Amino acid sequence: MADAMAERFLRMRTVSSSSSHSPPAAPQAVSPHEARPGLLDHALHLRWTLPLLAVLAALPLVASALGEAFYVGLATRILIFALAATSLNLILGFGGMVSFGHAAFIGIGAYAVGILMQQGVVSAWIAWPAAVLASALFALVVGAISLRTRGVYFIMITLAFAQMLFYLMVSVKAWGGEDGLSLAGRSVLGGGFDLGDDTRFYYVVLVLFVLAFLVIQRLLNARFGHVLQAIRENETRMLAIGFPVYRYQLAAFTLAGGLAGLAGALLANQSSFVSPSLLQWNQSGLLMVMVILGGVGHLWGGFIGAVVFLLLEEVLAAYTIHWQFVLGAVLLLVVLAAPRGLAGLLRREPRA
Amino acid sequence: MTGVLVLEQSLNGLQFGLMLFLLAAGLTLVFGIMDMINLAHGSLYMVGAYLIATAAAATGSFWIGLAAGVVGTAVIGMLLEVTVLRRLYQRDHLSQVLGTFALLLMANEGVRMLWGAQPIALNPPDSLAGPVELLPGFFYPAYRLLIIGVGLGVALLLYVLVTRTRLGMQVRAGASNREMALAMGTNVRRLFTAVFGLGAALCAVAGGMLGPLLAVQVGMGESILILAFVVIVIGGIGSIRGALFGALLVGVVDTAGRALIPLAFGHWLGPEAASGAGPAVASMLIYLLMAAVLFWKPRGLFPAHG
Amino acid sequence: MKTVSAASPLKPLAVAALAALAFSAQAADAVKIGLLSTLSGPGAGLGIDIRDGFQLAVKHGGGKLGGLPAEVVVADDQQSPDVARQTADRLIKRDKVDFMTGVVFSNVMLAVGAPTFASKTFYISANAGPSQYAGEQCNPYFFSASYQNDNLHEAVGKTVQDKGFKRVALLAPNYPAGKDALAGFKRFYKGEVLLESYTPLNQLDYGAEIAKMRAAKPDAVYIFLPGGLGINFIKQFVGAGLSKDMTLFGPGFSADEDVIKAVGEPMLGMFNSSLWAHDLDNAANKKFVADFQKEYGRLPTLYAAQGYDAARLIDGAVRDVKGNLADKAAVRRALEAARFESVRGPFKFNTNHFPIQDYYLRVITKDPQGRVTNRTLGTVFKSHADAYVGSCKMPVA
C-alpha cells in the first residue's frame, strides 16, 4: 500500500523513467504538466556523448602518431579517476551521503589485485572481480554502521574507517607497509591480449568506464535511482511514506564501494604500484573535490570533475612550478562563480 | 616501565592535548556559529608558525616574534573572512569543502613561494632550551612546561572571554541557536569576523608553540587538522568546553598509546610486532575512541546546540 | 613491459618515424638527465643539496656532460613513493631522459627503480643505496655514486665498539634504510643494545623515545635520522638534558651542515662517520668546496658531494662512449670503469655497481673561524666493500 502511494508520488514528479534519448534541458519557467523528462532523470545527451566517445577512442592513435605515447597513460589514469569520482557521486551527489572515506574502497580494490599478484594469481578474471567483491563487502560493513548516523557524524565515521584501514595497511610489512607494493606486471586477460601494452590497457579501461557509466545512468533513471534522489531531497518524507530508506542507502553505498574497488584494481594495474597513500584522507578529499568541481548530483559530474582537475594539474605543472596556487585559485573561482559545479554551468536546468 | 616514564608521557600528553585544544577551539566555534567546514584552518596554523618564526628571527626575541605573529595571523584571518569566506556561509557544506580546500592549496603554495620549500627554524627562547628538575632525578624539558603553561593560560582566558564578556555571550548564543541570536539583534558580520580572527589567533599560538618541537614546514597543518576535527566531534560541535575535554582526551590517549602499545606488543608479541603493528594500532586508537564516544553520546560529549 | 602497438594504418608512418629516430640516435645531440629528488618537506635540504651539487658539476663542464649539452629536468618526489613513481614515469616516458638520478630516500628509490630499469634507463644514485639493490635485486642499470646504506652505520658501529661503550640505545626511522642502518651498526658493534626503536618516517616529536631512553640509561645513543628528523631529535634530546649523560653518535647524514645550521652549538661533540668531508685533501674536492661556497653561500654536505660525483660519473661515461647513448652496453661498461675524478679521492665500483671506498670519522667542533662544523679525525675503514655483494648475481642486461 505504501509502495503504491510512493509510486504515484514519484510518478507525479516524473514523466518517463528511462529516457536516454530525451532532448536537452527545456527553458526556465515550465509547466509541470508538459511532457519532458523528470527532475530525477538524467539524460545521456547522445548528441554530445557519441562524439566524445569517438574522441576518447581515437586518442591513443593520435597520441602514438605524435610520438607522445605517455599521454595514453595519463588518459587511462584520468578515466580511472573519473570512474572513482562517478561512484562517489552516486552516493554523495545522488544519495546525499557525504562519505569522506571513499578512498578506502579504491585502496581495497588496488590491494586486492596487488596481494593476489604477490601470491601468484595474475588473472584479471579472478583478481578484478575479487577486488570489486572485497570493496563491496567492506562498503557493506562500513555502510551498515555509518548509515545509522547523519550529517557531520556520518562524515567523520566514514573518515575514521578509512583512516583505520590506512594505518592497518601501513603496518603490514608483508604487503609492503608504508613503502608500498610493486606489482610484477599487469593483470593477464588471456587470449594473447597483453595489457602490458598501454594502448590495449587504455581501451579496456575505456570499455569498463562506459559500461559502469551506463549502469549508473540506467540505475538513476530507474525506480532505485528515483527513490535514492527523493531520499536525498527529503528523507523524513520518504520515511513517513514507508520506504526502507536505510536499505536503499546501504545498497547504493555498497554499489558505489564496489565500483570504486574496480577503479582501484585498474589503478593498481596502471601504475603497477600500490601504497597506503591511496587510502589516506587526502585522497578521499581529492575525490570529493573532483565531484564537487564537476557538479554534485549531475550524471557527468564525476567525469567532468576528474578530467578538469587532473588535466589542469598536468597542464599547469608544465607551465609553472607554482601550479598548486593557480589550481587553488581556479577551484576557488569555480566555487564562487559556479554554485552547482561545472556541469551545472553546462546544463541550464529549471530549478525545482 | 617505570614511574618516570609514565609521568613523562602524561606530561607529554597534556602538552599535546592543550595545543590541540587551541586548534580545536577555533574550529569548533567556526563550525558551531558560522556552520562552516573550514579545511583551511590548518593553513592558519601553518601561516602563524611561519610568521612567528620570521618575526622571532628578525627581532631576535621569541616573545616578540610570538606576539607579532599572533597579531599578524589574526589580521590575515579576518581579512580572509571578509573577502572570501563570507561568501561561503550561505552555501552548502560541500561548496565550503571545495572553497576552503582551494584556499588550503593556495596557502601551501603561497608559503612555499615566500619562504621556500625547506622547513625553517624556530628556536625556543634560550632560557628555556634546557631541562628542569621537577622531582629529584626527574628532568623534563622546560620548553614543554612552557607549552603546558601557555595552553592552560589560553584556556583560562577563553573561559573568561566566553563566560564573562559580551562577545562571549554572543558567541555562546550563536553557537547554541544561530537564528535566534540573529533575531535578537547580534551584529552578525562583526561577530563572525571577530570569531574568525580569534580562531586564527589561537591557531597561531599553537603553531608558534609547537614550531620549536616539530618542523615549521609547508603542509604542517594537514595532519593536525584531521585530529582537530576528531577532537571537535568527540567534544561536541560548538562547545569550547567540549573542545578542551576532547583535546585533552585525544592528546593523552594518543601519546600514551604511542608509548605503551608498542611496549605491550613487544612484551607479548615480540619486537617485530612492536615496530610494525604497535604504531599502527596506536594511530587507530584515536578513531576507535571517537567511534566509542559517538556510540555512547552521538552528539559528542558536550553538545552546544540546545 | 610496454610496447607501442602499431597495428593500424599508421604503421608505415610509425616505422618511418622510428627510422628517423634510430638514425639520429647514433650521436645524440644532448644528454637528458632526470633529477628526481626530495625538494619539499623535512627532507628537502638533502634533495636541494644533491641538486645544487649536480648542477655545479654541469656548470664546471660548461653546461655540458661528456661533451654533450646537458639538459637537467628537476622534479620533486615529495618524499612519497607514490608521487615518485608517477613522476619517474613522466620523466622516462614523456621527457625520455637518458639517465635518472637524485632520489634521497630508499623507500622512494625502491618504487622508482622498477620502472626505470624496465625501461632500460640508467639510474645513478646520488644517495639512496638500499641493500636490496646491492644484493639479491642487483641490476645492470643501477649504479651507486654514493654508498650502500649500511656502510656509514658500520663505520660508527666499529667506532663505538672501539671506544669501549657497552650500553647503547638505537633509533632509526621505520623504512628500508632505517633497517639497513641498525643492521649495519650491529654488524660491528658487539656490546649490549638496551633499546632499539623504529619511528614512523613522518614522526617529528620524539618525546616518547626520549622518555624511554631516559628510563633505560644507556651510555651512548646512536641515531639515524636524516635531515629534518635529526634536527628535531637533537634539539629535543639536548632540551631534555640527556646530552649530559649520553654520548650521541650518528652517521654523517644526521650531523652534516644542514643539521648543524639548524641546531648549532648544542651539537658540539657529536661523532659521526662519512665517506666524504669538506676538509679532505685532494684537488677535485678543494675546487668543489670553494666553488660551492661561492655559488651557493654555504658549505656543502655529503649529499652535495654525492650529487657532484654523480654528474661527474655520467660526464666520464658519456665522454667514453663519445656521445653514443643508444649503445647501452657500451654506456654500462663506461660507467663500470668510472673514469672520473671523485671529490672523495680514488673511486672504483664493486661487481654489484656499489663503490669500494674509505670511510672517515668526524667530530663536530668549532673551526679556526669560529664556525660550528665537522672536523675529520681519522679513517675508520679503508677500501671498504658492502656486505651484500656476495648475494648479487648480476643479470645479463
Image: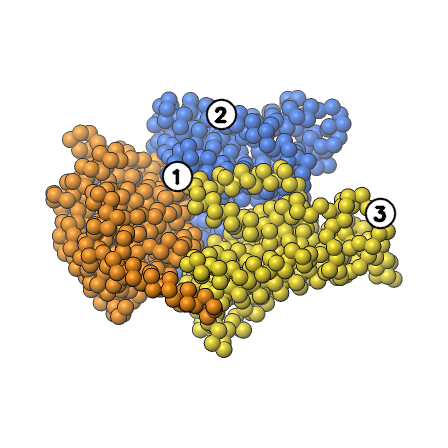
Q: Which chain is yellow?
A: A
Amino acid marked by disc 1? Ala
- The quarter of the picture where residue A12 lies is bottom right
Q: Is residue C355 in view from this perspective?
A: no
Q: Quadrant of residue B6?
A: top left
Which mark's residue is nearer the viewer, 3 or 2? 3
Query: Dots 3 and 2: beta carbons under 8 Å?
Result: no
Tell me the quadrant of the picture where the C terminus of chain C can be found. bottom left
Foreground of the two, A220 or A134:
A220
Give the mark nearer the N terminus: 1 vs 2.
2
Q: Which residue is mark 2?
A: B72
Image location of residue C267, percent across then percent down: 26, 37
C59 lies left or right of B15: left
The residue carrying mark 3 is: A31
Q: Colour of chain C?
A: orange
Q: How crowded is the residue under tag 3: few (<14 C-alpha within 10 Å), some, or many (20+)?
A: few
Tell me the blue chain: B
* x and y percentages locating residue B31 in the rendered image: 63, 37
Which residue is nearer to you in this view: B186 or A11? A11
